[in-house]
Image (tube, rainbow, N blue to C red):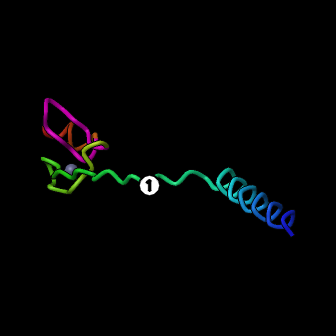
Amino acid sequence: MLKLIIICGFLYFLIRWIVRVLTPAIPTSHEPVELKACEFCGALVRVDKAIKVHGRLFCSEDHANRMR
Ligand SMILES: [Zn+2]
């Protein structure tokens, strides 16, 4: 009987380990994405994906060029 409990416990940890290894890492920390308005059209763009020209933010390269 004791053997069965030990085997079950071992299997439980083995399965947990396999699931953890096979499951792709899901990013748990969702950092807030800062949105800013494009200086040309006013569309909200993610700061990390915006085009930055002289400290001004644009939604695309095209709009950045139009404000030059
Ligand atoms: Zn724009």
Residue 39: image location, x then y, percent = 12, 47
| Residue, disc 1 | 28
At label 1, counting other C-alpha atoms closer than 10 Å, the crowd grade (few under 14, some 14-19, many 20 or more) is few
Q: Residue at x 21, y 35 (%)?
A: 52
Q: Position of residue 67 (x, y in %)?
A: 13, 39
Towards the viewer: 12 or 43: 12
Q: Amino acid at mark 1?
A: Thr
Report if residue 28 lies within the magenta region: no
- Residue, x 87% and y 63% (percent of image)? 3
The residue positioned farthest toward the front in the image shown: 2
Q: Residue at the bottom extreme? A: 1
Relative to 37, is 11 above or below? Answer: below
- In the picture, the quarter occupied by the N terminus is bottom right
Q: Nearer the viewer, residue 52 or 19?
A: 19
Q: Residue at x 64, y 54 (%)?
A: 20
In the picture, measured across the screen, residue 52 lies left or right of residue 68, that is right
Figure quadrant of the C terminus: top left
Task: Choose top left, top right, bottom left or bottom right for residue 47.
Answer: top left
The segment highlighted magenta reads 49-60
